[in-house]
């Protein structure tokens, strides 16, 4: 009987390995990055050289033990623009045949079709990576572009412990072994047993031209970008990492000791004696059937979870985002975010006026208290918003995935009949405008507090533009959308007008101008063109408001003889920048204040290309030794006629005179949308 039981276990283990191997060999899809800011003509010398490079890489992949090769195709006339640098890297466990097949498909089919006429491109498969450029990248670690892979399924058990095991394995075993190991491939695999029936498998690889230090840095940076997920990884131009709950690579690449199948708890030998012995044969049969049944159930659940997992890919680049899902179903992610309408109704005391925090064109915000005592801000969206259920859910998922200390955290949502609710964390000090533009409360904001607010907002926007899982253009940055916690730390709110940029997209356009005119750059207010520089302009207006304590109304009003930007620019040109500073501020840090005024004027320059990026703005704020360029003319005001669509709460231009816009306040929210 003991022998029979062992045979059953062997059969089950063999079956599990076969099935998991089938999963690991599932169809691979190409993912790529090829910016469109450098292109070449079809009949150019560069096109000829690129074709030569592709043939060289393809032919050299047929018999290359290292799974890596690089090549340079110089220009015939030594013209720097026509030289091409390229290499390929096959995964360390791939044989010569699969390596050659992957590289050939990448160079001869995919790159010409997916990245036509591009001088810079990188393409990733599960089995290989191919990269080329018009400038040399050999020996240089590059993590500026990266592809995030993760499985959109819940982790069974303790998420914190799971991710600790993953990152410990990736950092201390795979990263070190790939960087310092003796393999020419700079390739390493490892595994960690979570329990008797669950194992994490990991893989890491660098391009062999990297130094050990750069390889370790590349892998470490990638590990820091991992998301909480039962499977995932990062693909970068210089390295890649991956982990999962099944062996997706050749197990023979694992370091010794070899992988052992998970063992069952020891069972007393007396339970499996021969029928002629003292034990009960019937009891032994029952035990065997029970154990076998449990194994079958565990196996069935495991395969169900593996096959139902949704895989998601997000590509990041200097000017592009690409997001593709193999499965569009998002129900699992939505379940954990959805609130029952009755719960929110009770929390807000039936949306009583006493709990009302603010009202705007897109809805009303109420204070609420959940059954567990947590205070929340509930945004009850207008019933005529025109947004469909799927669009609403997509927006919820988008905002819920943004995690940064300077962004307001979305806790969940609710959809019932025509009701749509957004549930946010409640911040006790409401919004920045309540302090900044109130004569009495303004004194609470000394220069140290205001400078901290400026820096923190900049870091939050930088996260949206360059560091988050998705590239987000906010499009409605303003003082009322900056909320303050108990320590007066700012958090950016209201992503109702945010836009997600796609692959190779640096600019978008729309005929629906949304947001607040006082914070809009001229190219958006007049022509509907928006980009990351739109948020930079809004940030610049916000900085000038924080320094002066004045609203930017975009035109003269009863309190001031000229609009804010004109006022600041005039004093800057006259050499009297400190005249614009809020009178309630004690001017002790003149250098910092003048530097922030300088930065604000750089952000509101009329030409969007002249405005700095958010990464440069954060650098300006963190480095006082950095010399700032001289600001050019800001977006001056002439005149514009504006029609407000009261039904959709969007603005439409009717007539413009002059070269720029008058920025008028829209119907705004004193609390986040």
Image (cartoon, rainbow, N blue to C red):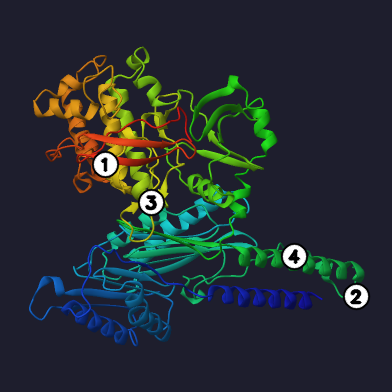
Left or right of 341? Residue 560 is: left
Sort mark 4 into few (<14), some (14-19) or many (20+) by Cα contacts within 10 Å. Answer: few
- Using the numbered discs, state the Cα–Cα distance from disc 4 to disc 3 in whole angstroms: 42 Å
Left or right of 142? Residue 299 is: right
The mark nearer the N terminus, 3 or 1, is 3
- Using the numbered discs, state the Cα–Cα distance from disc 3 to disc 2 in whole angstroms: 69 Å
Residue shown at 27%/61% (left/top)?
A: 141
- Using the numbered discs, state the Cα–Cα distance from disc 4 to disc 1 in whole angstroms: 63 Å
Residue 245 picture location, percent across and down:
56, 64
Residue 290 picture location, percent across and down:
82, 65
The mark nearer the N terminus, 4 or 3, is 4
Residue 88 picture location, percent across and down:
31, 76
Q: Secondary structure at mark 4?
A: helix
Residue shown at 24%/26% (left/top)?
A: 563
Q: What label does residue 297 carry, if any?
A: 4
Residue to which mark 3 is pinned = 471
Q: Secondary structure at mark 2?
A: loop
Q: Nearer the viewer, residue 599 or 363?
A: 363
Left or right of 448? Residue 592 is: left
Foreground mark, 4 or 2, reads 4
Give the answer, above or below, for where 376 lies relative to 214. Answer: above
- Using the numbered discs, state the Cα–Cα distance from disc 2 to disc 1 in whole angstroms: 91 Å
The mark nearer the N terminus, 4 or 2, is 2
Q: Residue 661 appears in which quarter of the rendering? A: top left
Sort mark 3 into few (<14), some (14-19) or many (20+) by Cα contacts within 10 Å. Answer: many
> Total marks drawn?
4
Foreground mark, 2 or 1, reads 1
CB under 8 Å between callouts 3 and 1? no
Q: Secondary structure at mark 1?
A: helix
Residue 259 picture location, percent across and down:
55, 70
Residue to which mark 2 is pinned = 275
Residue to which mark 1 is pinned = 522
């Amino acid at each position: 009987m003991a022998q029979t039981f062992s045979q059953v276990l062997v059969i089950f283990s063999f079956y599990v390995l076969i099935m998991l191997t089938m999963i690991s060999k599932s169809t691979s899809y190409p993912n790529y990055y090829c910016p469109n800011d450098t292109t070449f003509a079809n009949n150019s010398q560069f096109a000829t050289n690129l074709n030569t490079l592709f043939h060289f890489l393809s032919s050299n992949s047929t018999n290359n033990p290292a799974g890596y090769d690089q090549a340079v195709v110089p220009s015939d006339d030594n013209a720097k623009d026509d030289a091409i640098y390229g290499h390929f890297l096959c995964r360390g466990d791939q044989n010569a045949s699969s390596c050659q097949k992957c590289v050939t498909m990448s160079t001869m089919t995919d790159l010409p079709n997916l990245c036509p006429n591009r001088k810079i491109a990188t393409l990733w498969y599960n089995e290989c990576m191919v990269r080329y450029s018009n400038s040399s990248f050999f020996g240089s670690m590059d993590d500026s572009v990266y592809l995030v892979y993760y499985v959109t399924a819940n982790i069974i058990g303790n998420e914190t412990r799971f991710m600790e095991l993953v990152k410990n394995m990736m950092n201390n075993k795979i990263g070190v072994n790939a960087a310092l190991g003796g393999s020419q491939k700079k390739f390493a695999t490892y595994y960690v047993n979570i329990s008797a029936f669950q194992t994490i498998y990991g893989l890491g690889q660098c391009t062999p031209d990297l130094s050990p230090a750069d390889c370790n840095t590349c892998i470490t940076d990638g590990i820091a970008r991992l998301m909480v997920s039962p499977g995932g990884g990062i693909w970068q131009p210089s390295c890649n990492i991956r982990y999962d709950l099944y062996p997706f690579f050749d197990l023979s690449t694992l370091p010794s000791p070899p992988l052992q199948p998970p063992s069952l708890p020891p069972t007393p030998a007396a339970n499996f004696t021969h029928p002629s012995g003292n034990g009960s044969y019937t009891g032994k049969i029952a035990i065997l059937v029970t154990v076998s049944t449990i194994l079958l159930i565990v196996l069935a659940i495991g395969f169900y979870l593996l096959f139902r997992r949704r895989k998601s890919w997000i590509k990041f680049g200097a000017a592009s985002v690409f997001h593709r899902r193999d499965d569009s179903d998002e129900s699992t992610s939505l379940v954990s975010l959805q609130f029952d309408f009755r719960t929110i109704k009770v929390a807000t005391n039936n949306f009583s006026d006493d709990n009302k925090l603010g009202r705007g064109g897109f809805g009303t915000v109420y204070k609420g208290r959940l059954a567990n005592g947590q205070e929340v801000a509930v945004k009850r969206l207008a019933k005529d918003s025109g947004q469909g259920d799927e669009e609403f859910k997509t927006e919820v998922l988008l905002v819920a995935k943004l995690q940064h200390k300077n962004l307001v955290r979305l806790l969940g949502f609710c959809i019932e009949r025509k009701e749509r609710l957004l549930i946010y964390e409640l911040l006790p000090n409401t919004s920045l405008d309540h302090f900044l533009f109130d004569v009495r409360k303004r004194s609470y904001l000394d220069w140290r507090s205001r400078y901290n607010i400026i820096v923190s907002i900049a870091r939050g926007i930088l996260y949206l533009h360059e560091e988050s899982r998705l590239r987000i253009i906010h499009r409605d940055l303003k003082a009322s959308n900056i909320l303050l916690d108990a320590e007066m730390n700012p958090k950016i709110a209201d992503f109702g007008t945010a836009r997600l940029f796609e692959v190779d997209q640096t600019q978008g356009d729309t005929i629906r101008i949304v947001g607040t005119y006082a914070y809009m750059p001229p190219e958006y207010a007049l022509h509907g063109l928006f980009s990351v520089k739109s948020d930079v302009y809004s940030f610049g207006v916000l900085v000038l408001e924080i320094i002066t304590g004045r609203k930017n109304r975009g035109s003269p009003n009863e309190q001031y003889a000229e609009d804010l930007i004109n006022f600041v620019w005039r004093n800057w040109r006259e050499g009297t920048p400190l005249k614009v500073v809020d009178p309630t501020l004690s001017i002790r840090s003149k250098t910092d204040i003048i530097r922030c005024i300088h930065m604000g004027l750089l952000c509101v320059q009329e030409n969007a290309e002249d405005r700095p990026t958010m990464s440069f703005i954060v650098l300006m704020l963190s480095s006082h030794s950095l010399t700032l360029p001289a600001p050019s003319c800001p977006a001056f005001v002439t005149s514009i006629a504006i029609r407000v669509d009261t039904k959709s709460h969007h603005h439409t231009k009717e007539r413009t005179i002059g070269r720029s816009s008058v920025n008028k306040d829209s119907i705004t929210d004193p609390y986040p949308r």
